[in-house]
Image (cartoon, coloured by chain):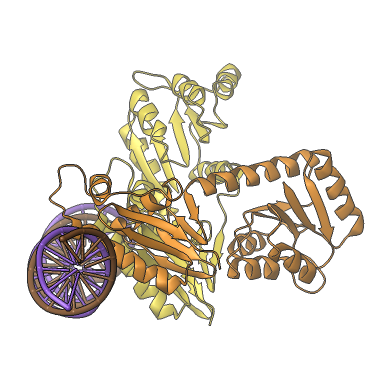
Chain colours: A orange, B yellow, C purple, D brown
Amino acid sequence: MRILVVEDENNLASALVKLLEGQNYLAEAVHDGQSGLDYALSGQYDAMILDVMLPGLSGFEVASALRKEGLDLPILMLTARDKVTDKVRGLDSGADDYLTKPFTTEELLARVRALLRRQGAVQMDTLTFGDLSLSLDASTLSCQDRQVRLSRKEQEVMRILMSLPPSHIISKDELIMKVWGADSEAVDNNVEAYVSFLRKKLFYLNSAVQIVAQRRLGYSLEYTAC
Amino acid sequence: MRILVVEDENNLASALVKLLEGQNYLAEAVHDGQSGLDYALSGQYDAMILDVMLPGLSGFEVASALRKEGLDLPILMLTARDKVTDKVRGLDSGADDYLTKPFTTEELLARVRALLRRQGAVQMDTLTFGDLSLSLDASTLSCQDRQVRLSRKEQEVMRILMSLPPSHIISKDELIMKVWGADSEAVDNNVEAYVSFLRKKLFYLNSAVQIVAQRRLGYSLEYTAC
DNA sequence: AACGATCCTGAAAAGAACCTGAAAAAGAAC
DNA sequence: GTTCTTTTTCAGGTTCTTTTCAGGATCGTT
């Protein structure tokens, strides 16, 4: 687990890094908002501890910039202030949790653990395949920075395709069974229609994933990395 | 904020409910220990006012049963007796505070406020989201220089939406649970009606915050800074 | 090349979810 | 009681989803 610490006060920053390293995290500190943003955008961290008061960009600005870029890296925000509006502002700008100084080391570690745990749970209801990720609770499919909403049946079909073993082919009958139910009236063309809907959305997303018809057999998902 | 009143004396019970509703809490009364326990276990309340002398289960028994179930709902215990041993027994059985009859309404309200405050970051006096701020004690929603009054249910719906994690979607069922209660007759259209009321007010306020319907999933709050 | 089987997709129809104005019902305030 | 506000209910309209249909495209086979 890699954790990025963004804190301008050198003593605190290195204390945090040492504390986290003591817990077998890989911690790294930077000392201003812009570097914090840049490092976080590299995408190599699993969580971020972010002070609000920073030279250059404030913690709020860093957090909302990150969210605007679509990064869902967990953020624990630190501040000396203890105002409700700050807390709300912090959470609004995209922080996942908020801790006011001074705090005990146990408190900080507990929050970091909770953050990482929550992050794990979040990934449970997200499926990925190739450059795609399907969020099951928001019913959205995204690729890079684009995102579309899926209807219930679109989502079901996509979920089934994405959770297939690699290059496995699934028949229309099986899809009908899983999406419409065993005793439904649905016909092959229903599946074809939804495949068509999904292809349109994949095209819009500019994804490198394709739904390929395997004549007479069914469909499979193919990812052709450029 | 939903508060459960468990008091067998009808006059006092309804007086308490009215008093609490006058402070913009959503209050509900039941009249015996077993119902008190059942209602509290539903998990839809933020605090509980519990008389000690009750038909069936006593207040002590209700409190300790709740704690045994792992609920940390704040409990304010009421009693006519003024014995130290009762007080100790009350606190031991899991009550958070203890008030002996007779008491003034101010005293009761102060204790309820303290209870909710202690409960955690819950009882904030104002919530903000985007350009909006919701004043909970004045029941007003404001944006820039404009301001509107919200009815009790409007306020509850808005409060719940505003205290959601960013871009989180809340289902109509969950809103019904939190605003109308789990055992209510409320249907989806009730929520829709309140969303409509609130949208009208947001429009009047000229706010950049929107209540967005996420078809079949629920609602979320979106802030589109121009 | 010709044929049948399969697949694709635009468009229309049917269905479900959501929105909202208006009025009735319930509750508060006077 | 009367008036005002709040809450619930209802009905019709809008929008999105799902199904259906029909014609065209593609593929494998002969």
Q: Residue at 66%, 65% (x, y): give it.
A: A63
Image spot of residue B204 (x, y percent): 39, 80
Q: Residue at 77%, 69% (x, y): give it.
A: A33
Residue B191: quadrant of the picture: bottom left
Residue B29: quadrant of the picture: top left
- Left or right, D6 with reference to B226: left
Name the residue nearer the viewer: A225 or A54: A225
Q: In this figure, what is the number of numbered marks? A: 0
Image spot of residue A23 (x, y percent): 79, 38
Above or below B58: residue B205: below
Image spot of residue B163 (x, y percent): 51, 57
Q: Residue at 54%, 42% (x, y): give it.
A: B107
Q: Can residue A201 be spotted in the picture?
A: yes
- Left or right, A106 with reference to B212: right
Name the residue nearer the viewer: C8 or A161: C8
Name the residue nearer the viewer: B110 or A40: A40
Q: Residue at 50%, 76% (x, y): give it.
A: B224
Image spot of residue B219 (x, y percent): 38, 61
Q: Can residue B106 be spotted in the picture?
A: no
